[in-house]
Image (spheres, rainbow, N blue to C red):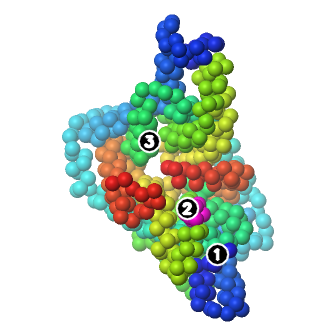
Amino acid sequence: MSVTNIAGASTAVRTKHGLRLSYIGARVLLYTVVLVGAVLYSLPFLWMLSTSVKPGYQVYKVPPEWIPEVWNWQNYVLPWQNLPFATFYTNTIVITVTDILAMLASSSLVAFAFARMRFRGRDSLFVVLLSTMMLPGQVTLIPIYVLWSKLGLVNTLWPLIIPSFFGGAFNIFLLRQYMMTIPLEYDDAARIDGASWFQIYSRVVLPMTAPAMGVVAIFAFTYHWNDFLGPLIYLNDTNNFTISLGLQLLNSRYIQEIQQTMAQTILAIIPVLVVFFTAQRSYIQGIVISGVKG
Amino acid sequence: MLGISGPAPGRAAAAPTIRTRRGLSQRQIEELTAYLFISPWVMGFLVLTLGAMVFSLGLSTFESDLLSETKFVGLKNYASMLDEPLFTKALTVTFFYTFLTVPFATVIALVIALLLNQSVRPLGLWRTVYYLPAVVSGVAVALLWGWVLNPDFGLLNQGLALLGIRGPRWFASEEWAVPGLMLIALWGTGTNMLLYLAGLQSIPTEVQEAARIDGAGSIQVFFNVTLPLLTPTVFFNVVMNIIGSFQVFTNAYVLTGGGPNNATLTMVLYIYREGFMLFHFGYASALAWVLFAIILVFTLLIVRSSTVWVYYEGGLRR
């Protein structure tokens, strides 16, 4: 086990006993720092949790009580009577689920062609694809808005769904990189057995790409579940709102009821946390892979 | 779809010898199928990227609300920015935010990663705790921090009060609103931390041990061995952070709407205001291009400078 940076001073100490002591001291210091940092990073969550179960009159108590005497679960229920939260969730789920499926289908098909098929212009098209990842969304924001508005689709969920059917440059890149690691002999064998290219894609390569597909699904999920600017621009009618817009509406309309806002915020992030904790391995791997290779 | 892509059974094996027997060769079928497969992306690229960019560039030379009147004005939208105090303000705010956030986020993420790399146990637990804030994003984070940074009843100022410090007014004050936004970004720096941690773990311990045997102290090892080997990760994170910081929007929109007195009017918020609230679509398009140009210049500057400070083990072709 290597001695820590913090334990750096320990090299100066000669005796075995002294070295041991300073090593333990360094470990204690290290764990203390890590723990204090972890507490600091967790406190905002705990603060939100504590506020969410407080009755209104306790929220503005100084100094604050972390565990309220009376637990007010109404904060979780009451906003559903004032605003159509069930609709917000339905809309968000419809958008998110469709987007994930469309994104997986389109991106994997495109990635398959780039990774495993020969066609003229492949490499230059791939460079074009990579370069689109650098383009900030603001430049195309207004023209795309104009397009949807001319098609009469503003204030529907479609502008938030349709783009996923065209694939995403980053996802195509990720899937392509993964598919490149699968030996081409599989395709040749399947071709000799008379499989079509689509069958090679769907029956041979896709099953082996499952881990990367999982990463894409997770990214798509978090992105669309949390998306704010898109819904903000395209959805005007409260009945079309997603949960992001619903939270913002709750906050602006009942600004003095911070305990209700906190309770609803917790409800809104639970699905994200569930996905994270169930798929933590591929989640973290996905981040690392996309960071190292991107 | 299957029609073109499915060669007749038995034909695949015969293909290499017989090139063009009836109609298309195997190679041609492969090529056409490939074009079909990439067609979703090609269509999306032509309409939603290339078409949109051309349209946006064109639109930026018009004065247009896209409803009543559209008038060609040449480069006036670009020229008039310079006389527009809000443009200067938005630019200042965005630069201030970016150059405050990126260095702090880089250092904090690196420090956390270094601490967690000292065989702290159980690593999974600590890593999750530090990473969790990055999982949550968007409006939820903004609302949470609006309450944490509440000047009178918020967690942070009450905590500071325990230490005898009178906390700033955060989003209610012009000076402290942007630092408030920075705190949110620092809390969510987990993705950077993960990448640094992965980078640190990929450094072979032999290199560090060799330096140690040669008599280097821990600090020397860090600055002369570990950090240089980590520079590719630093480079990637800094580039991504700069791009992201220049585009900050949700937190400013939800928490302050750009206030107080436009102290948090970021560029994207300014574009949103001009485009989607005032319907100055031409001017907003011009603003978007200026933002793009700024991001591009800074990215290129860092990429250029990287030859000096980023160490690639494989060496760099000159």
Identified at 66% across, 43% down, the residue is A211
Q: Which residue is mark 1?
A: A2
Separation (CA) of disc 2 from disc 1: 17 Å
The chain carrying label 3 is: A
For mark 3, give the secondary structure: helix
When asked about the image quadrant of residue B140, the answer is bottom right
Q: Nearer the viewer, mark 3 or mark 2?
A: 2
- Which percent across, then down, holds residue A141? 42, 41
What's under tag 1, amino acid-wise? Ser
Classify 10 Å Cα crowding around label 3: few (below 14), some (14-19), many (20 and above): some
- Which percent across, then down, holds residue A32? 67, 80
Q: Which quarter of the image is occupied by the C terminus of chain B?
A: bottom left
Q: Which quarter of the image is occupied by the N terminus of chain B?
A: top right
Report the span colored magenta. B196-204
Task: Return the residue nearer the eye: A13 or A249.
Answer: A13
Magenta segment includes B25:
no
Residue at mark 2 shares a chain with residue at mark 1: no
